[in-house]
Image: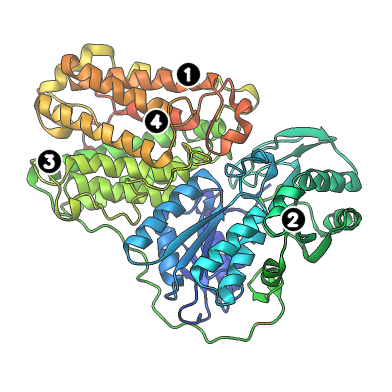
Amino acid sequence: MTVLTNDPRAFADEALAGFAAAHAEEIRTVHGGVVRASATPPGQVAVVIGGGTGHYPAFAGWVGPGFAHGAACGHVFASPSASQICSVARAADNGGGVILGFGNYAGDILHFGRAAEQLRAEGMDARTLAVTDDIASGPADNTAPRRGIAGDFSVLRIVGAAAEAGLGIDAAVRAGRRANAATRSLGLAFGGCTLPGADRPLFTVPAGRMSVGLGIHGEPGIAELPLPTADRAADLLVDRILAERAVAAAGVGGSDRVALLLNGLGATKYEELYVVHRRVAERLAAEGLTVVAPVVGEQITSLGMAGLSLTLTFLDDELEALWTAPAATPAFRRGAIASRPPRTDDLTTTHRMPPVVPGGPGSRALGARLAGALLTVRDTVVTHEALLGDLDAVAGDGDHGIGMRRGAEAAAAAAREAVALGAGAGTVLAHAGAAWSERAGGTSGALWGAALTSFGAVLGDHDDGTAGRDGGTGGHRAGTAGHDGGTGGHRAGTAGHDGGTGGHRAGTAGHDGGTARRHAGTAGHDDGTAGHDSGAGGRDSGTAGHDSGTAGHGASDGARLARAVRAAVDAVLRIGGARPGDKTLVDAAVPFADRLEAALPTAGFAAAWAQAARAAGEAAEATAAITARLGRARTHGVRGLGSPDPGAVSFALIVAALTPGSPDASNSPEERH
């Protein structure tokens, strides 16, 4: 259990600050993470790795000569944002291009992919490498959807050594991909981990049992077996990994040499690991395999989870030379590397935000109302934070509530600051989207950030709805979670959000009762709110509804807002890759946009929004009957049956709260604080 915390929301930042203070001679902090404190030879490829906090030594502990040049560090179990990754990459770049390495999870794919696009737009040669070593999370004949677990260490270590050896970016990427194809891992858990500030673990393992095939974000295993002896646990790990020996070794000439990592997950300590390693070594020798430079200890943990994992990487001559090459990082040392002079450059300029575009009078007024709407969003998320976390804990990592809260709070603050600087509506939402993506991280951060930015792009910064310079909304792709979406493509892991499916733990799905539908269904007051469409007596609301409260007057403004909603939903579809039926946010967002457009011509905007909010709530509740096909929850899809998807629920709660006439809607931005 995570015991020593202050504010749980500050846990990741405070842990990174303490790490930096402890290793000031080896690393330096930058916005979003850390980089080497020592100078790197000009022209050397930079390897930037990253992921969520809670896995130490991964990922900051691997920064140093012979390994990574920098690490982007997200919140607990949440991917770093694209803007954080870009910031670290700019600080790490030596002119030879940058390789972005990460585990194959939805949020990481989205944010690292968006970061690569932004860096390329700035003229940097940026490549991505997703690690897919976990044999429990996908079939042997299709490894692309598999998660990255402890194999992150082995694969990224080889990539870092390739860069250190002076290989160009093409050759270093090839080495990394060959290492990934040759790497297999499997984990066992004896007890779950507890998020900072939580009063219970994300999952429990019954006495006398163990969980097989766990994830590193507190996800439970895919099966439970009786708790074995150490030798039988070793046999299980070896047998299941070697079942894929022929395929894993094929890309390295059928080699019989392997790199080995026996990894502790946080609470299973060294003596136990060595007892297991004794048997693993015996078994591998009996199978005719030669173990090269084994690593036994904690390299990628899951807070205080009790458990361990075994990783094998089949080696040819090139990969063996890279695996055994010297390295010097805070958490991993091998051989000797000559000392290097400290870097002396300015690292304060690596983070970039969209500029503030002044808006016309009407657009500034609209921006102020939208800032008020974001206060309603913030308050709604805060109210339901615990519920959303519980929903996410069934098959995900339980962080959807806290992630949404971080994002909503940051977006509301950024919008208010932009309004104070005279920004138009488009720029207000561009800043809000960038802040949401930055602070929330994870898949939900990327999707909500892109949605807000795309919504604002339709509204623009001038009274005629056109954008200001640079597109008004900060088409500035850095830090906006990227609407334009190109990366998130592979549906293999890019789904809706970092918990994917959700339901309550152990049958508590009824909690708050058909949550989304109950809230969405009551907020609209049926069609009785339609009369506000003309703006008479309208609430100057911070709600998104209401033509007078948001966009001005009349049907044309309602149509414009509906177009903005459609643009936001399209951005989510484009960058997330999910479709209705995948059990993600999309399952509520698409019905919402469809119903809004269908009802608008006859019902007026306020009533159409109310109908759309009810449709979103019903659709969110209906996700309880389907299994997740994307995201972290995909591996545990059946566990989520009977519980709605947390991303769909949070979307439905938000649009319900923004419904004109809803008791949750704000009266005016000026009355909020």
Q: Which mark is residue 549?
A: none
The residue wearing badge 3 is 465
Give the mark nearer the N terminus: 2 vs 4.
Answer: 2
In front of the other: 236 or 242: 242
Label 4 sits on residue: 651
Mark 1 Cα within 10 Å, few/some/many (few <14, many 20+)? many
Disc on the earlier residue, 1 or 4: 1
Task: Give the total number of marks visible in the rendering.
Answer: 4
Circle 3 sits in a helix, a strand or a loop, which is it?
A: loop
**Disc 2 marks which amino acid?**
Leu
In front: mark 1 or mark 4?
1
> Label 2 belongs to which residue?
312
Which quadrant holds the C terminus? Answer: top left
- Is the residue marked by circle 3 packed among few (<14), some (14-19), or many (20+) residues within 10 Å? many
> Is 584 situated left or right of 538 in this image?
right
Q: Quadrant of residue 507?
A: top right
In the image, what residue occupies the spot 69% across and 46% down? 1
Residue drawn at (12%, 44%) of the image: 466
Give how far apart the Cα atoms at labels 1 and 4 are.
14 Å
CA distance separating discs 2 and 1: 42 Å
Amino acid at dot 1:
Ala
Position of residue 263 measured from the top left corner of the image (x, y, whole percent)? 74, 56
Q: Given this view, does label 3 or label 2 mark the residue nearer the observer?
A: 2
> Which residue is under mark 1?
622
* Amino acid carrying mark 3 in the image: Gly
In this rendering, the answer to whether 512 lies above or below 29 is above
Of pointers 4 and 3, the one earlier in the residue sequence: 3
Crowd around label 2: few <14 · some 14–19 · many ≥20 (10 Å): many
Q: Nearer the viewer, residue 615 or 150?
A: 150
Q: Distance from label 4 to label 3 (Cα)? A: 26 Å
- Residue closest to the eye, 367 or 556: 556
